[in-house]
Image (tube, rainbow, N blue to C red):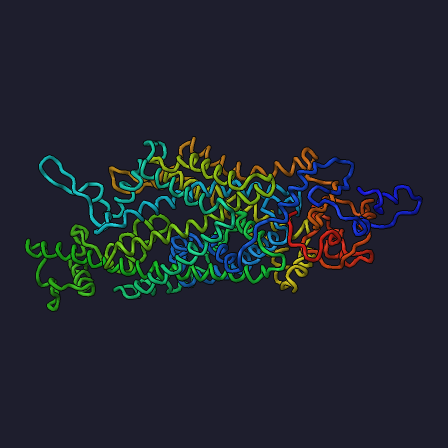
Amino acid sequence: MPKNSKVTQREHSSEHVTESVADLLAHQEPVDYKRSVLNVTGGETWDKQKEGDEDLDAENRPAWNSKLQYILAQIGYSVGLGNVWRFPYLCQKNGGGAYLVPYLVLLIIIGLPLFFLELAVGQRIRRGSIGVWNYICPRLGGIGYASCLVCFFVGLYYNVIIGWSIFYFFKSFQYPLPWSECPIVKNGSVAVVETECERSSATTYFWYRETLDISNSISESGGLNWKMTLCLLMAWSLVGLAMIKGIQSSGKVMYFSSLFPYLVLVCFLVRGLLLRGAVDGIMHMFTPKLDKMLDPQVWREAATQVFFALGLGFGGVIAFSSYNKQDNNCHFDATLVSFINFFTSVLATLVVFAVLGFKANIMNEKCVVENAEKILGYLNTNVLSHDLIPPHVNFSHLTAKDYNEMYRVIMTVKEGHFKELGLDACLLEDELNKSVQGTGLAFIAFTEAMTHFPASPFWSVMFFLMLINLGLGSMIGTMSGITTPIIDTFKVRKEVFTVGCCIFAFVVGLIFVQRSGNYFVTMFDDYSATLPLTVVVILENIAVAWIYGTKKFMQELTEMLGFQPYQFYYYAWKYVSPICMAVLMTASIIQLGVSPPGYSAWIREEAAEKFLFYPTWAMAILISLIILASLPLPLVFILRQFHLVSDGSNALSVTYKKGRMMKDISNLEDNDETRFILSKVPSETPSPMPTHRSYLGPGSNSPMEMSSAPNGRYGSGYLLASTPESEL
């Protein structure tokens, strides 16, 4: 330090020192800011180079190029495969149009408040999930680690689904589509239809045998399926390329991956409405069954769908929001994304049931033709009398209405022997009531319907390209829930960690591309995320509303947003959401106990699905998944409760670099003597950063409340008015 500086002069003076660090710095002579670092610490020696690196990292935190890019990223993350193949199934199963009522109610009282909460804490603290919950309550810092683990488990199997879509995508570039007809095999000199295909259907056979080459049970590994292994490698390569530069690369990908599915859905809707029978499907879909609204199971499934549709608890929402500016209106973002997600689900439901209505008509006509041939055979062999056939019926142009009339007459006359005839009712309602979801909808029912489309390869290419993009958008958000908090916390190199994470995930994911891999996908989908994520979101809600303080949080939101959020959020965060989530968690635990863990296995010899229970070793894996995902929660609490690990407390660091002031304050007591150093503040400009304090306690003032203290604005003295948002 120069000899003539004011600080040096004061060292040799008996004058009482009352000036703050900021005043002293204001009189400092020009120094080399690249090398100069001023540290005031609680008796600890700080590594200057490390401190400088952290400051530089804070200044250079990536940001979204535009608000549109950010909104598309959140939409791409929240709108995923579940909107296309889960929501329509739940809507059909739980009362048609009546299901929309509990879904909307729960979206408003659970989904929107919790989504807004995650957006707000991410934007406020500007860290990934680990940093956010360490800041709010160090003892609940395990929330961030649990979120990362769940993201890893979900990413493992979710990318396998993208791999399946990639396989179907490349298989779609041929006419006719390879799943449109059963394969012919030679049995000596005779050509016959493949037995497994003949006993099921062409699309079912292609899915289970050609795509998965599935084994009869989870215990029969069968070795790796090399086709699926290559597709999984391609899927992880796509994710790695999209993520390697963080939001600089993934943000650009989102322009296509978020918007393209809407283009495809609109095209499918227009095409679907022009198909014969599409209106039947849509009318069946939205005909409300009001009695279903009184069923608690409907509300439980609606709450679960809301919970997963918005991606709550994964950390992806927080990660994306952390790259926002501090004054961004995250309340508007939460409302917009939540309702876009809902309307996307409704749009997808219209498309699915327009197409399934067309398929139901095709299958119903096929049923009529097959049973009409049986009746003709009975007429020719005098099993049935010609007098039973109405005179206006023409077998060469038999309609479903004529067949139903004929069927009722025969059933009435031959009541005692009717079952022996083996005739089917061929009702359109029965075809429409066949519930399909998940892979059964995308890779069997929908593919079968597309084989009847004119220019079917084109529509197949579009459909599976849409699935790839929906999956990719969700995978980018899921992987951000891992990479952002880890990079923020441990300062690892972004590119190296992303590539390493993708390679490791691919190697572990080989378990899903065995011949029994589909059963492991089912296991992970059913059990790896549901219960741990419910606990995570409950603790997030409690950490903000009851430990950090709802009033304090609302005050900080008011300063950050420039307006006070509705009081509805106060009561939702403090009472409604925790109670609803606790009920959902209890219902999920009861459901796990009532429904024995099992899976639907495809039995090759029977060409049919059969429900099997998990063997003991698979149950051990299942339980381990739940325990491992939840383990960070009690582990971090115990370690920090008994001070076995540091939470960064009792340390004050004041640094300056390149003319910008930074600070790092953790767990300062209200009467800490270092407050004396901070007594004067040269600027009254509000800080764009929250003061870096862990939990202040219910009786303490929030950083916003301190800003009105007579001796200055706490937390803004070392940030110039023009300083951009920095990392904590």
Q: How many marks?
A: 0
Q: Position of residue 530 (x, y in %)?
A: 49, 45
Q: Position of residue 511 (x, y in %)?
A: 40, 35
Q: Position of residue 59 (x, y in %)?
A: 63, 49
Q: Position of residue 52 (x, y in %)?
A: 67, 42
Q: In this view of the protein, which residue sits in the foreground, 226 or 244?
A: 244
Instruction: Give the residue at x 38% y 64%.
Output: 286
Q: Residue furthest bottom?
A: 392
Q: In this view of the protein, which residue sits in the foreground, 514 or 481?
A: 481
The quarter of the displayed image where residue 116 is located:
bottom right
The vertical placement of 550 against 644, above or below, is below
Asked if residue 217 shows in the view, the reply is no
In screen coordinates, is 722 left or right of 176? right
Q: In this view of the protein, which residue sits in the foreground, 537 or 367?
A: 537
Instruction: Give the residue at x 63% y 47%.
Output: 58
The quarter of the displayed image where residue 138 is located:
top right
| Quadrant where the N terminus is found in the figure | top right
In screen coordinates, is 419 left or right of 596? left
Instruction: Give the residue at x 34% y 58%.
Output: 352
Q: In this view of the protein, which residue sits in the foreground, 287 or 212?
A: 212
The quarter of the displayed image where residue 183 is located:
top left
The vertical placement of 359 against 674, above or below, is below
Asked if residue 574 shows in the view, the reply is yes
